[in-house]
Image: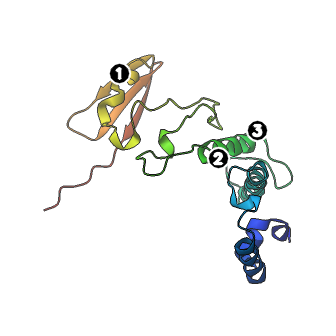
Amino acid sequence: LSLINSPTHRYEMDTNYYVAWCDYYELHKEHWINDLLDPRNVLLWEEEEIFSLQYLARDMYDSSYPVCIGTFEKLNKKGWQLLKNSTAITNLNIKEGSQETFRDGDPSEIRSIFTGIAPVPLRKLWLELEESDYNDLLKQCRGSFKEEPSTTTSQLTLKGKKLHYSRFKVPDAE
């Protein structure tokens, strides 16, 4: 029943509501709901995101998922950070025709829900990055970075602990 209180969710599941919504917008194209930057629209979007996160929190709890973002009644710190991350990605204002992706935006508001650490801004557009573009940073990570040329596995040593990661290698077409 809670879904009925969500305009977006009701729009998606109630045919009569959908038709009425579309008819209204056709007659009122100047309405604030058609302006994505209108503060009321931003607030509506945020309320919808919170609502979706509440359902996600409930489902995570009910399924014994090992990460908790709160409950349907109340999001915890991780849940609120997910909302901030989602808002930051949505507010990137990528220009039409640009080759930018959501990865190219300003990451200053985004944080890991586990560590609180912010991501590092990219040095160039995501689509232009090469594998070697960040080897210098990896070497500075209080450890060393070792690329094993004969495999697709790399090793990062951080504070005496070896962390391994691998990249899937696509086989050459025959």
Marked residue nearer the N-terminal end (3 or 2): 3
**Quadrant, the C terminus:** bottom left
- Residue that appears at 73% across and 62% down: 30
Q: Which mark is residue 136?
A: 1
- Residue that appears at 85% across and 66% down: 5
Q: Which residue is mark 2?
A: 86
The answer to whether 135 is drawn above or below residue 73 in the figure is above
Q: Which mark is residue 77?
A: 3
- Circles 1 and 3: CB atoms closer than 8 Å: no
- Circles 3 and 2: CB atoms closer than 8 Å: no
Instruction: Give the residue type at disc 1.
Output: Asp
Query: Which of these two is toward me, 141 or 83?
Result: 83
Mark 3 lies on a secondary structure that is helix
Instruction: Give the residue type at disc 3.
Output: Lys
Q: Which mark is residue 10?
A: none
- Residue that appears at 30% across and 37% down: 130
Marked residue nearer the N-terminal end (2 or 1): 2
For marks 3 and 2, give the CA distance: 14 Å
For marks 2 and 1, give the CA distance: 30 Å
- Residue that appears at 73% across and 50% down: 38
Marked residue nearer the N-terminal end (1 or 3): 3
Where does residue 166 sit, x and y in percent of width and height? 36, 42
Q: Is residue 62 visible?
A: no
Mark 3 nearby-residue class (10 Å; few <14, some 14–19, many ≥20)? some
Mark 2 lies on a secondary structure that is helix
Where does residue 136 sit, x and y in percent of width and height? 35, 21
